C-alpha cells in the first residue's frame, strides 16, 4: 500500500477522525520499524517490490 501512495492518503484520512494521528504516527513509527527490523521505509518498499516481481 505504501508503494501505491497509501501513506499520504491514510494519514490524511486518519486526521479527519483523530487530529492527533499525525503526531502519534511520527512518534510511534520508529518503534514499530525497530520491532519489525525495518531499516527505512525505502528499504521496505524495495523489499516489497522485489518480492512482488520474484513471484
Image (cartoon, helix red, strand yellow):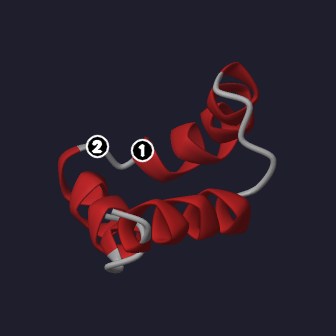
Q: Residues within 10 Å of mark 2 (few under 14, many from 20)?
A: few
- Residue 2 position in % (x across, y down): 41, 67
- Outermost residue on the top side: it is 35
Residue in view at x 62 percent, y 28 percent: 32
The answer to whether mark 2 and mark 1 are in CB contact below 8 A is yes
| Label ID, residue 41 | none
Q: Residue at x 54, y 37 (%)?
A: 24
Q: Does residue 45 appear left or right of residue 39 in this picture? A: left
Along the line of sight, which residue is nearer the eye, 49 or 2?
A: 49
> Front-most of 11 and 3?
3
The CA distance from mark 2 to mark 1 is: 5 Å
How many numbered discs sit on the rendered protein?
2
* Residue 51 location (% of width, % of height): 46, 60
Q: Is residue 34 above or below residue 40?
A: above
Compared with residue 28, is residue 53 higher up or lower down, i.e. above or below? below
Classify mark 1: helix, strand or loop: helix
| Residue where numbered disc 1 is placed | 21
Residue assigned mark 2: 18
Location of the C terminus (image quadrant): bottom left
Secondary structure found at label 2: loop
Give the image quarter of residue 46.
bottom right
Look at the picture and state if 47 lies above or below 34: below
Who is closer to the viewer here, 46 or 41? Answer: 46
Estimate the x, y position of residue 19 in percent, counting from the top left.
36, 49
Q: Residue at x 42, y 44 (%)?
A: 21
Crowd class of label 1 (few under 14; some 14 to 19; many from 20; radius 10 Å): some
Amino acid at each position: 500500500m505504501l508503494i501505491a501512495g497509501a501513506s499520504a492518503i491514510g494519514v490524511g484520512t486518519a486526521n479527519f477522525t483523530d487530529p492527533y494521528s499525525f503526531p502519534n504516527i511520527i512518534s510511534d513509527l520508529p518503534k514499530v520499524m525497530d520491532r519489525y527490523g525495518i531499516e527505512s521505509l525505502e528499504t521496505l518498499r524495495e523489499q516489497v517490490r522485489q518480492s512482488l516481481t520474484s513471484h
